[in-house]
Image (cartoon, rainbow, N blue to C red):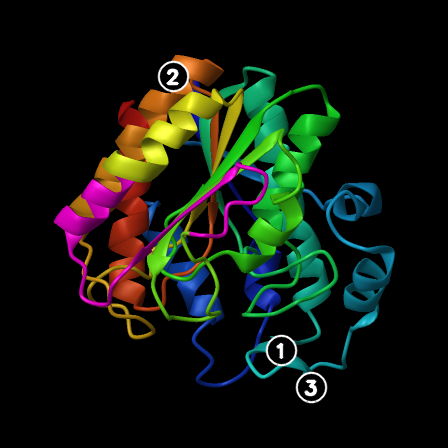
Amino acid sequence: MSTGLISHPACLAHDPGPDHPECPDRLRAVRQALEDEAFALLDRTRATPASEAQLLRVHSAAHVARILAIRPEAGRRVQIDPDTMMSAGSAEAAVLAAGGAVAAVEAVLAGRMRNCFVAVRPPGHHAGPQTAEGFCLFNNAAIAAAHARAVGLKRVAIVDFDVHHGNGTQDIVAADPTMFYGSSHQAGAYPGTGFAEETGVGNIVNTPLRAGTDGAGFRAAWHERILPALDAFCPELLIISAGFDAHRADPLAQLRLGNDDFAWITRALMEVAETHAGGRLVSVLEGGYDLVALAASAAAHVRALMEG
């Protein structure tokens, strides 16, 4: 079985506006990096839209209806919160981003792919049951996890190495013992959540890292806290919220990871997936705002997925 790559050009049509860090060039940079000859064996598939029923597994009906109804004229934008904008193509991009994550779950569970990277935007891990925030409209990783549960899996884990805590994902899964959420993130950074004391029903493991933490500190945090808890949870499917903004070059935070650290955590998570889930793993793009660092980090991540 091959490693899959799911994306869609319509995800480029989500345009938050000039100088916004979550820009279409982020996805262009990732897609271009993955056009290199080293990635020729990727099983490339276009995302399909998530159904309303799939969105409603994690979001309220009011939230889904609100986001789907916001379709401004070309060149205009609607502000959702101080950081989150919607343009004419945003609703379609958000539905495709969520649908791409669902399609990856279906492909991995069916055995058509060993693992899969979902290169889409807008990102998702700040979107909660009733809220869009922090550049995120729908929670792609949580929608994918809920779909896996709906088709019969008993234990699904979401892990998150984005530099920002996935408060939306935590809110969605915190009361559900069939779901696990583990996150490393910069302490005190947006959105100000993710304290170690936030443990849900024993299914949440947060590991905040001080500004300036380097790769050694990052690896130690995962090795000592998150990976043992994930291993004890015994997931039948592992979903990664793959944000690359903990890179030392990223302008929005102050962790100091390099490309090799993203390759390392990818391999470590693949080992857990191999032990408990028959290798089944889906990775969904989240943050990363220095285009060169984002492209290189995503390439290192996907290369590790292919080599596993």
Question: Please, what secondary structure does the residue beneath circle 3 have?
Answer: loop
- Residue drawn at x 49%, y 69% as measured from the top left: 191
Give the number of the mark in front: 2 or 3: 2
Q: Nearer the viewer, residue 219 or 136?
A: 219
Give the number of the mark in front: 2 or 1: 2
Can you say whether 279 is above or below 102 in the image? Answer: above
Q: Position of residue 137 (x, y in %)?
A: 65, 63
Residue type pointed to by label 1: Met
For the record, the magenta segment spans 197-222
Query: Is residue 44 among the parts visible in the rendering?
Result: yes
Query: Could you tell me if the residues under marks 2 and 1 are in contact, i.e. CB atoms within 8 Å?
Result: no
Q: Which mark is residue 85?
A: 1
| Residue under label 3 | 76
Residue type pointed to by label 2: Glu
Distance in Å between CA atoms under marks 1 and 3? 10 Å
Residue type pointed to by label 3: Arg
- Residue drawn at x 59%, y 57% as measured from the top left: 168
Can you say whether 101 is above or below 28 in the image? Answer: above
Question: Please, what secondary structure does the residue beneath circle 1 have?
Answer: strand
Distance in Å between CA atoms under marks 2 and 3? 47 Å
Relative horizontal placement of residue 22, taking residue 154 as reference (left or right):
left
The reply to whether the magenta stretch includes residue 129 is no
N-terminal of the pair, mark 1 or mark 3, is: 3
| Residue under label 2 | 274
Q: Position of residue 241 (x, y in %)?
A: 46, 46
Q: Nearer the viewer, residue 183 or 67?
A: 183
The reply to whether the magenta stretch includes residue 202 is yes
- Residue drawn at x 73%, y 23% as measured from the top left: 151
N-terminal of the pair, mark 2 or mark 1, is: 1
Q: Quadrant of the C terminus?
A: top left
